Image (tube, grey):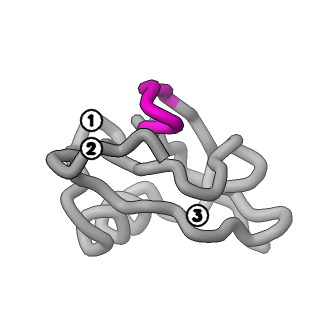
Amino acid sequence: LGISLDETGVLIYGIEPFSSAQRGGLQKFDLIQEVNDSKILGIRDLREQVSLAGLGGKLKIKILRKGKNFTISLKLIDI
């Protein structure tokens, strides 16, 4: 997966079809490390940032994918 033991974040195990995550380009085994410039240490941090953005809000997500850093922007939609 290209993730060292000292990396922190939330690992994606699955993506819902037609979801904001899928439309935004997130993939299985991406490690979410930051959302809207806030460090993500666990699922609570991720849920908090999603809640703060709210439906229709935008998220800037820093991920680690196969050992490389990427930034993805997505809009939260209702499915």
> Which residue is the site of mark 1?
37
| Residue under the image location 22 percent in, 44 percent down | 38
Nearest-to-viewer mark from 3 and 1: 1
Within 10 Å of disc 1 (Cα), the crowding (few <14, some 14-19, many 20+) is few
| Residue under the image location 43 percent in, 31 percent down | 67
Left or right: 15, with 32 as reference point? right
Within 10 Å of disc 3 (Cα), the crowding (few <14, some 14-19, many 20+) is few
Mark pair 3, 1: CA separation: 19 Å
Give the amino acid type for the residue marked by disc 3 in the picture: Leu
* Boundaries of the magenta span: 64-71
Mark number, residue 4: 2
**Residue 37 or residue 29, whichever sits in front:** 29
Specify which label sits upstream in the sequence, 1 or 2: 2
In the image, residue 21 sits, relative to residue 62, either above or below, namely: below
Residue 35: x percent and y percent? 35, 45
Give the amino acid type for the residue marked by disc 2 in the picture: Ser
Prevailing secondary structure class for the magenta stretch in the rendered image: strand
Mark 1 and mark 2 in contact? Answer it, CB < 8 Å. no
Give the amino acid type for the residue marked by disc 1 in the picture: Asp
Specify which label sits upstream in the sequence, 3 or 1: 1
Check the picture and name the quadrant holding the C terminus: bottom right
> Which residue is the site of mark 3?
55
Within 10 Å of disc 2 (Cα), the crowding (few <14, some 14-19, many 20+) is few
SS at mark 2 in the image: loop
